[in-house]
Amino acid sequence: MRYTEMNKEQLIAEKASLEREYAEFKEKGVNLTMARGIPAPEQLDLSINMLLHCLDGDCKSKSGMDCRSYGVLDGIPEAKELFMDMLHVGPDEVIVGGNSSLQMMYDTIIRALQLGVLGSEKPWCKYDKIKFLCPVPGYDRHFAMCEQLGIEMINIEYKSDGPDMDEVERLVASDESIKGIWCVPMYSNPTGITYSDEVVRRFANLKPAAKDFRIFWDNAYCVHHLSSHHDHLLNIIEECRKAGNPDMVFEFSSTSKISFPGGGLAVICASKDNIDFIKKQMAIQTIGFDKLNQLRHAKYFKNFEGIEEHMRFHAAIIRPKFEVVLYMLEKELMPLGIGKWTRPNGGYFISFNGMDGTAKRIVQLAKEGGVALTDAGATFPYGKDPHDSNIRIAPTYPSVSDLRQAMELFCICAKLATAEKLLG
């Protein structure tokens, strides 16, 4: 019987049974985490040969540059080629940076605030107020960045194929203080949604009131498919060029979950004019990034086909984990009418929506039971989920057996929190 169909006596009996089940689980002394999207050790092992004999003393790029020394601000040619094929951009549209796309996003906003972007009348910090649109639920680190830098955030609801574009178009066209929007367009964090062709084209055809408006296109999961029947995403840089808005987008990506988190390569892609403008600003910041790491990646993967093959091994490791999460949710919660969840074709997360007013309680119960989850509210600006319903489930790090145990507790907690809410 669905919980919403139970009478008060039935709910009280169900709650008492769940409390006993929860107490028994706590006695197991479990200590597991599903708090962040971290690759499992088996995934990191896939790239270990990159660190062993990849260079073998040959530290020169194919251009003849000694990668042990200074120079090449925008990345060695062979590293650029990896991302050119992955993101379908030209050599003048990409900068290969350091180990973190998040840092490149942060630096891009800092430069915009202090120095402006191409087409700015003045640096963003000279305006009375700066606003960003934030599709929700979304990536907590995007929101934390804005909060730290004093950028006001406006929630934009997700639809089945991406953000609510009617609202995006209306707000962008009517408010000059809106300077940007955050997007995770493929296997979005945490919903797993990939933006439809129509949504991408509507982004490319935006008519912002602010001449220096930018789309921050965090394409973190563009090759993180779970199977061969995967999603496809239109090329936003190409679509912006077609729409006559070539300078409106900054695209970011990295190999953080391809090779090594914290030891991979990150990129920013944009129009040639944007890249030239950024390079002039960056030339004061750094002489160049870690070219030895760029060379290691280029020699190890060789080309984009090498990355695709590598990602099939990643998928073989994490696909069973997604299947465990979905199986447990469907087995334990679906018959009771508790919650809704996404079934992504890739990425690192499953987005769970419980009954309004239960997410914080579920996370609290899970923590006390020995399973750490991402904080409730983290997927919204300022940590405030207006419905207190969304929880980001990150299945990748635990082993399959640990994940089964963690999801057993999660389902108990979701049932108990729902019963409490209905009785409350």
Image (cartoon, rainbow, N blue to C red):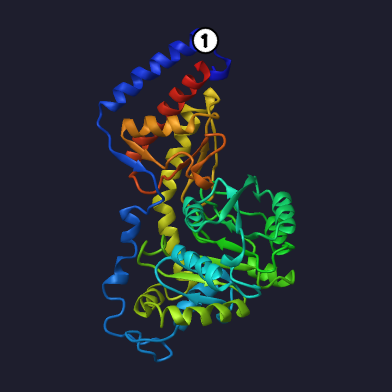
**In the image, is residue 389 above or below residue 8?**
below
Q: Nearer the viewer, residue 226 or 128?
A: 128
Residue that sits furthest to the bottom in the current view: 64
Q: Position of residue 37 (x, y in %)?
A: 41, 50
* Visible residue check, residue 137: yes
Give residue 259's quadrant in the image: bottom left
| Residue positioned most to the top | 9
Q: Is residue 416 above or below residue 107?
A: above
Q: Quadrant of the N terminus?
A: top right
Which x, y percent locates residue 186? Answer: 57, 56
Instruction: State the residue in front, 134 or 47.
Output: 134
Q: Amino acid at mark 1?
A: Lys
Q: Picture coordinates of residue 331 (x, y %)?
A: 47, 29
Give the secondary structure at mark 1.
helix
Q: Nearer the viewer, residue 69 or 284?
A: 284
Circle 1 crowding by C-alpha within 10 Å: few under 14, some 14–19, many from 20: few
Residue 409 visible in image = no
179 displayed left or right of 192? right
Location of residue 75 (image quadrant): bottom left
At 63% from the left and 54% from the top, the residue drawn is: 195
Quarter residue 393 falls in: top left
**Residue shown at 30% from the left, 80% from the top:** 55
Tell me if 33 is positioned left or right of 148 in this view. left
Q: Which residue is mark 1?
A: 8
Measured from the top left, where is residue 374 in percent x and y? 42, 43
**Vertical side of 43 occupied by 4: above or below:** above
